[in-house]
Amino acid sequence: MDATVQESQLARTRRARRVDRALSVRYPDARCELDFRNPFELLIATVLSAQTTDVRVNQTTPELFDRWPDAAAMATADLQDLEDVLRPTGFFRAKARSVSGIGAALVERFGGQVPARLDDLVTLPGVGRKTANVVLGNAFGVPGITVDTHVQRLSQRLGYTTSEDPVVIEAELGALLEKREWTMASHRLIFHGRRTCFARRPACGACPVATMCPSAGIGETDPVVAAEMVRD
């Protein structure tokens, strides 16, 4: 695709939806990779996922939720005990304060339950739009676009946006995709970013959307080498 050709909003919309369909074929198992059993667990796990991997969070949360299974328990947890459990996730002191504060806020303002509205979720300690949309989309079935580092990078590479502002990216990506697809489209972009379209050296030669991507060719173009780079 010639990146110098001015693309209309309609053409960009059609291309974005073709890309999403192609990614749905490549990643039929795309999903939230954080383990959770209820909205509270997903909320806490998402906050903990900052600056670490989902794998590390999933290794940490079983003990966390065994000891403090709900908002009331989390609110009254000893901070030192929380820090000890959360240490493997990094930034454990700040995260301990955040999850304790979330527990207290849920008890004080929401009857101990996780609210299902973005405007309410973002009032909780350590919760921004990204975390709120993860919870809404995966725990409540409310469509939302999660602009994490992968979605931001791919949205720029695919020519959906030139912005660095996650709020702007969320709005511009949302305007291109059907609302009902927002949550799953986010998962597919995240899967693609983790498995193929890497930050430093994307595997362009093994990319299912290379023919629709204005950035195609910035990474490894040899199909054999690129295929070896792709992660499961």
Image (cartoon, rainbow, N blue to C red):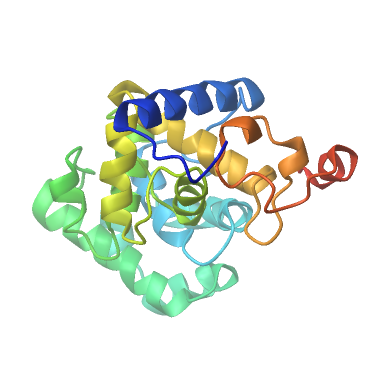
Q: Position of residue 49 (x, y in %)?
A: 49, 58
State the residue in front, 46 or 62: 46
Residue closest to the far left: 109
Residue 47 location, quadrant: bottom left
Identify which residue is drawn at 33% across, 60% down: 74
Query: In the image, what residue occupies the spot 37% across and 48% down?
Result: 161
Quarter of the image where the C terminus is located: top right
In this image, 232 relative to 163: left or right? Answer: right
Q: Position of residue 216 (x, y in %)?
A: 64, 44
In the image, farthest residue toward the front: 5
State the residue lying farthest toward the right: 224
State whether residue 41 appears in this view: yes
* Left or right: residue 139 compared with residue 33: left
Please name whichever residue, 68 or 136, is drawn nearer the observer in this view of the structure. Answer: 136
Coordinates of residue 6 in the picture (x, y in percent)? 39, 40
Residue 169 x/y as whole percent: 33, 49
The N terminus lies in quadrant: top right
Number of marks drawn: 0
Nearest to the observer: residue 137 or residue 87: 137
114 is higher (above) or lower (below) than 165:
above
Q: Nearer the viewer, residue 106 or 47?
A: 47
When the figure is inspected, residue 197 is found, relative to residue 182, above or below; the finding is: below
> Who's the residue at 32% across and 68% down the image?
98
Q: Is residue 140 visible?
A: no
